Amino acid sequence: MGEKLPHRTPPAPTPDPSTRAFWDAAREGKLLIGRNTKTGKAHYPPRPVCPFDDEGEVEYVAASGRGSLYTYSHMHAKTPYVIAYVELEEGPRIMTNIVDCDPTTLRVGQKVRLVFVPSEGEGQPIPMFTPAEENPGHAHA
């Protein structure tokens, strides 16, 4: 069994008018996804036009913060990290990092939960995930 990953501070995002609602929600501890009001199909990242159907309006909704590890790679950089795709409970897959874990214990299909990690500079929270069975007292999401 290995060790937990060292803390890595992600770079700060540069919000623009089309992403402002997403980043504002992240500051409140919410991960927004888009959902077509006619079809109910969810997508990520949220955007004003549904990528699957040009009918219906798009609403931004908070994701549950639960998902499963779809695939991942352990990056052996100066500060090692795990990059992954997480399949959200609502359906969309999100490219993210897996944090607060021993990467040798990760497995495809493993349940994960949302946490927010402060970024460089002003600390804009970045949505990331951690194994659901680890850190039960970690209350970022």
Image: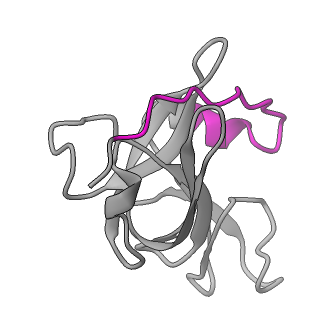
> Which color scheme does this rendered protein use?
one colour
Where does the magenta region start and end? 4-25
With respect to residue 116, does 113 lie above or below? Answer: below
With respect to residue 47, does 17 lie above or below? Answer: above
Tell me, yes or no, if residue 65 can be seen here. Answer: no
Task: Name the residue at the front extreme.
Answer: 1
**Image quarter for residue 10?**
top right
Which residue is found at the position 40% from the left and 73% from the top?
A: 89
Locate residue 7 relative to residue 24 in the image: left or right: left
Where is residue 73 drawn, in percent x and y? 58, 63
**Image quarter for residue 125?**
top right
Tell me, yes or no, if residue 91 can be seen here. Answer: yes
> Camera-side residue: 97 or 90?
97
Which residue is found at the position 48% from the left and 32% from the top?
A: 117
Where is residue 19 drawn, in percent x and y? 75, 42
Where is residue 38 drawn, in percent x and y? 63, 84
Where is residue 48 drawn, in percent x and y? 78, 60
Locate residue 40 relative to residue 11 in the image: left or right: left
> Camera-side residue: 76 or 69?
76
Locate residue 7 relative to residue 93 in the image: left or right: left
- Residue 71 is a magenta residue: no
Task: Name the residue at the top extreme.
Answer: 122
> Camera-side residue: 104 or 123?
104
User: Predominant secondary structure in magenta?
Assistant: loop
Which residue is found at the position 37% from the left and 64% from the top?
A: 106
